[in-house]
């Protein structure tokens, strides 16, 4: 299809290639690949066990990032942020559930963060 498609519902059991603009209320397919820019106006919900973002810049407007959002009982998994450092050891900041304390891993040792 070229030039653009405007539809309320588009169902594809095989491959559907649209060159131009597609405006739709619903799209039902086994997979969608966008080789150019993809703009989603509205909310985007991703249901699955893994979401991978291959991006150089990640901008988040929310001032709180929630980790371990699927914990519904007594927490047992640590949570934190890790920095990939190439050929050097990674560095991280994390919450240790066994001690209920924050730690910084400076690539060689983990040190507890002193709270004032």
Image (spheres, helix red, strand yellow):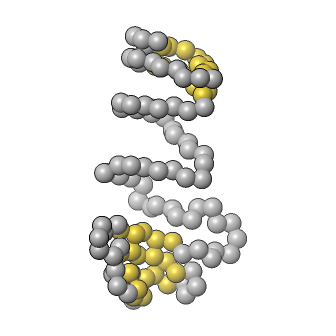
Residue 26 shows in this picture: no
Residue 61 in the image, given as x and y percentages of width and height? 38, 51
Residue 66 in the image, given as x and y percentages of width and height? 51, 62
Give the farthest residue toward the right.
73
Q: Quadrant of residue 26?
A: top right
Give the farthest residue toward the front.
87
Image quarter in which the C terminus is found: bottom left
Q: Quadrant of residue 99?
A: bottom right
Q: Residue at point 42% right, 11% down?
A: 2
Query: Is residue 93 shown above or below 114?
Result: above
Residue 115 in the image, given as x and y percentages of width and height? 41, 87
Q: Quadrant of residue 94?
A: bottom left
Choose between 82 and 58: the one closer to the eye. Answer: 82
Choose between 28 and 101: the one closer to the eye. Answer: 28
Q: Residue at point 42% right, 49% down?
A: 53
Q: Residue at point 70% right, 71% down?
A: 73
Query: Is residue 80 shown above or below 42?
Result: below
Query: Is residue 34 shown above or below 101?
Result: above
Residue 97 in the image, given as x and y percentages of width and height? 57, 80
Residue 87 shows in this picture: yes
Tag count in the figure?
Answer: 0
Q: Residue at point 39% right, 74% down?
A: 92
Name the side, left or right, on which 96 lies relative to 54. Answer: right
């Amino acid at each position: 299809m070229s030039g653009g498609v405007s539809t309320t519902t588009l169902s594809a059991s095989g491959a559907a290639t649209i060159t131009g603009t597609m405006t739709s209320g619903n799209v039902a397919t086994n997979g969608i690949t966008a080789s150019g820019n993809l703009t989603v106006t509205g909310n985007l919900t991703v249901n699955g066990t893994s979401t991978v973002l291959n991006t150089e810049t990640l901008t988040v407007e929310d001032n709180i990032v929630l980790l371990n959002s699927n914990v519904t009982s007594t927490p047992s998994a640590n949570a934190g942020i890790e920095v990939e450092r190439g050929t050097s050891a990674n560095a991280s900041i994390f919450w240790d559930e066994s001690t209920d304390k924050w730690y910084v891993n400076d690539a060689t040792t983990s040190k507890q963060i002193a709270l004032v």
